[in-house]
Amino acid sequence: MTQTRREKQRDATREEMITIAWKQVGEMGAASLSLRGIAREMGLTAPALYRYFKDRDALVTALLKDAFGSLTSALETGRDSCPVEDYPGRFSAMGKAYFLWGAQNTQRYALLFGTPIQGYLFDAEELGSAAQSSFFVLQGVIGEAHAAGKISRGAVGFRLPVSLESQYDALSQYGIPYNPLVTHLALSVWASIHGITSLYLYNYLQGFLQGQIEVFVDVELKKISQSLGLE
C-alpha cells in the first residue's frame, strides 16, 4: 500500500527521533534518555513528540525492537552467506556475525544485554517476537543440521533433567519446531558466543589477546562446531 505524504512525514520524524535517541544512549547512557532532550535537538516542543511515543518507556521499547531487528538481520546475513548444505560454514558465519555485531554496535548490545534501565518494564507483548527472533536463527541452524543427521551422537547422547525437558517442551507454544535437545544445544552455544562477546566488549580479553581477538573467536567457533559434529 502506497504511503500518504503525512504517513511518510510521520515515519521520517519517528526515525529521526530514534536516531537521536541512540545518540543520547551513546553519549550519556540509556538511563539518561529524555523525550524533552530529543525535542530540543529537533527544534520541536515536547508535547509534539508525545504524538509519536507516549512516554520514555515507549521510546525504549522502540529502541529495543530496533536493536533486536538489527541483530537478527546480521545473524541471517551471516548464515545465508554459506549454502544451505554447508552446516559448519553456516554455523561459524552466524556465530562470527554475532560477535562482530556486538563489537560494531556496542550501544545496541548494551541496551539489549547490559544493565537494565531503572523503572523500565519489558513489554513482552510488543517485544516478544522481536526478542526471540535472533535466538530462532541460531536454533534453526542447529535444528537443520540435526534434522540432516549432522549433529554427532555425542552432542545429543545425554538425557535432560525432566524439569528442563518439560520447560523446553513448553516453548512449542511459540512455534519452535525442534525437540528439547536442539533447544538445549542452541542455548548452550548462545551462552558460549555471548560470553566471548561480552568479555571482549567489557575489556577482559584485550590484555590477553591484543590484536588476535578475531582469531580467538574463529578458533572457539571451530571448537564448538567440532563438538557438535559439524566439522
Image: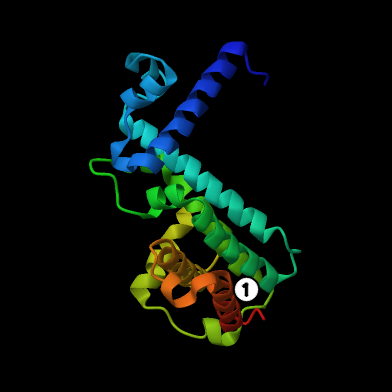
Residue 155 in the image: above or below residue 27: below
Q: How many residues crowd around disc 1 within 10 Å: few (fewer than 14), some, or many (20 or more)? A: many
Q: Quadrant of the C terminus?
A: bottom right
99, 23: nearer the viewer:
23
Q: Residue at x 49, y 56 (%)?
A: 102
**Residue 105, x across and y down, in percent:** 50, 50
**Residue 144, x across and y down, in percent:** 65, 67
Does dot 1 land on a helix, a strand or a loop? helix
Residue 219 in the image: above or below residue 141: below
Q: Disc 1 marks which amino acid?
A: His
Q: Is residue 31 visible?
A: yes
Residue 157 in the image: above or below residue 211: below
Q: How many marks?
A: 1
Q: How is the image coloured?
A: rainbow
Q: Quadrant of the N terminus?
A: top right
**Residue 86, x across and y down, in percent:** 73, 70
Q: Residue at x 45, y 47 (%)?
A: 108
* In the image, farthest residue toward the left: 119
Quadrant in which residue 44 is drawn? top left
**Residue 18, x across and y down, in percent:** 46, 32
Residue 32 in the image: above or below residue 101: above
192, 188: nearer the viewer:
192
209, 9: nearer the viewer:
209
Quadrant in which residue 124 is drawn? top left
Q: Residue at x 38, y 65 (%)?
A: 167
Q: Mark 1 — residue? A: 146
* Left or right of residue 83: residue 16: left
* Left or right of residue 41: residue 221: right
Q: Is residue 143 visible?
A: no
